[in-house]
Amino acid sequence: MAQFFKYFFAALLALFVFSLLAIFLLFGIAGALASKEEVTLESHSVLYLDLGKQIGENARENPLGPLSGDEPYAYPGVFDMVRLITHAGGDDQVDGLYLKVGSNANGFATNEELRNALKKFKQAGKFIIAYGEVIPQQAYHVASLADKIYVHPKGGLDWRGFGLQYVFFKKALDRLEIEPQIFYAGKFKSATEPFREEQMTEPNKIQSREILEDLYRHFLGETAAARKLDSARLRQMADSNSLRMAMDGVKAGLLDGVKYEDEVKEEIRRKSGAKTIDRISFVSMATYSQAVNYQSGTGTDRIALLYAEGNIVDGDGDENNIGGDRFRRYIRKARLDDKTKAIVIRINSGGGSAMASENMWREIELAKKDKPVVVSFGDVAASGGYYMACNADSIFALPNTITGSIGVFSIIPNMKGFLGNKLGITFDGVGTGPYSNSPSITEPLTETERRFFQAGVDSIYLTFLTRVAEGRKMAVTAVDSVGQGRIWAGQRAIGLGLVDRIGGMADALEAAAKLARIKEYRVREYPEKLNLLERLTGAYKHTVGVEAARKEMGEDIFRLYQEWQQVKSSIGEAQTKLPFRLIFH
């Protein structure tokens, strides 16, 4: 008994010490956050924007930043970046902007938003200098309008055209004796192809080639205009893979020179008037967001701005996805607020749960009876992301937004062979009727059950078509002709009637204000900011858990893991979702 109490009290003491350390840690971080000094801007400051950092739709809090050497400030979202760059264009203390383009972490439409903002910044008389060791094509799309684009002498410019790849699991599933029982509506609905095919189907190849061509044509056209080059010549250089060395890009007119980073900073030093390169007043976008008031508005009227980013899921979800119930509450709150005169919803989602999409569609339908609802599409607004938006008063997209994918699918895996033959696990049971245990992953579906599930998918697809037809004022047959799960680039979607106008977040807000007949307003953003405790605990869970997994697996394997997790969570449920994950090269 004495030995028992010895170990018991030792364990109790260890638990007490650990809890005490955790409390001190939380209070220490809280104190650091609370005691942040006011940020002041020096004269001749130079903004610093790194395209290698992922930019979400909403600002990303980082309360644990100081512990890892990062900034303690929230990293601005896409629209924050647009407003910050616009504000800097008229800021006398900002001389220019240093654009790091050695990598790219963002989608086509996000880069388009940044590029449009930087174009106005440049027109305001501020310099932009871009630099990268090896510059990928998507980063070059933003860099192309810079005053000067430099590359490392031993680096280069990736100039090979656009491509995409799908990952196929059918052979692996066959070897594991897992049968992915698949039901889908739409011949282009390729979200299930990785589980039922060993390569792309012909319809998927058709749509993939077309959207790549649309995206690439826009990229070449913008580059040609910015660099005063011929787009046909730019394509020919990619097709021949002629830009293999750093100087090749200079000779082609796509780059302005080869330099080491210290030489680039020396040029910035001369432009900003700093005494040495170490004395250049570089200001990150996160720091600049703390130094200036870029979200100012006037008047008592409000426009609600809702950020809907990530996979669409049932329930509340979390900060990394679109929880159908949570976003319904946001829309309802904005609808019932008398001071809110219009609602703008920014969507960056490839879809997800059909039920959650339907419920958000319904909430938007109710809201637009009381006040204007305008939607802005980001990188992706497809399948469920399009479903929830199709009845808005007006829809904006960027030329390179991926949208459409009007289709439905459901997957119910039969794992009887895997569990029985590979693991030696068998199942048995009883029920009150023939379908009381249906569906089950431990038994194959009967032909009758298969007909039931296919009929359910077809019914949801018809509802989807009807929602789009009513919202877009089109015939159901017309929607079906551009539906069938097919994806489109934003520019082409206008001609098909799926989108109203080309434009970004600022354009959507301006349109909402006009529809509401207001000139002065403030923007109220949802989701609302988390409190200190939520920021600390949430950041810890996300940063430590997710980032540790990402680092251990590597980016590509981690993406596949995320996709598999989404597949597991949607087993047996109808999904309105974009074709798997498009990995562009």
Image (tube, rainbow, N blue to C red):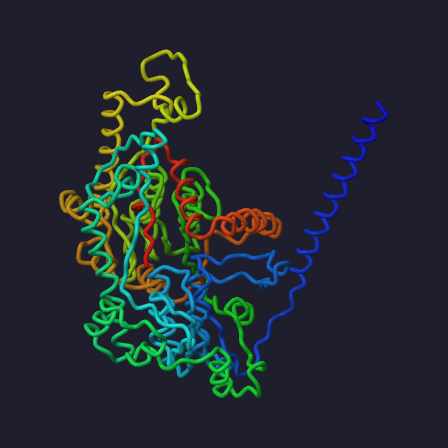
Q: Is residue 94 left or right of residue 312?
A: right
Rendered view: 53 above or below 389? below
Measured as percent of width and height from the top left, residue 455 is found at: 23, 29
Measured as percent of width and height from the top left, residue 488 is found at: 23, 54
Q: Nearer the viewer, residue 277 or 529?
A: 277
Give the residue displayed 30% in from the left and 64% down from the top. Answer: 503
Q: Is residue 77 left or right of residue 145?
A: right
Give the residue displayed 57% in from the left and 77% down from the top. Answer: 41
Rendered view: 553 above or below 141? above
User: Residue 362 occupies which quadrant of the picture?
Assistant: top left
Measured as percent of width and height from the top left, residue 377 is found at: 32, 56
Q: Nearer the viewer, residue 512 or 89?
A: 89
Rendered view: 267 above or below 108? below
Give the residue displayed 31% in from the left and 43% down from the top. Answer: 168
Rendered view: 287 above or below 170? below
Q: Quadrant of the N terminus?
A: top right
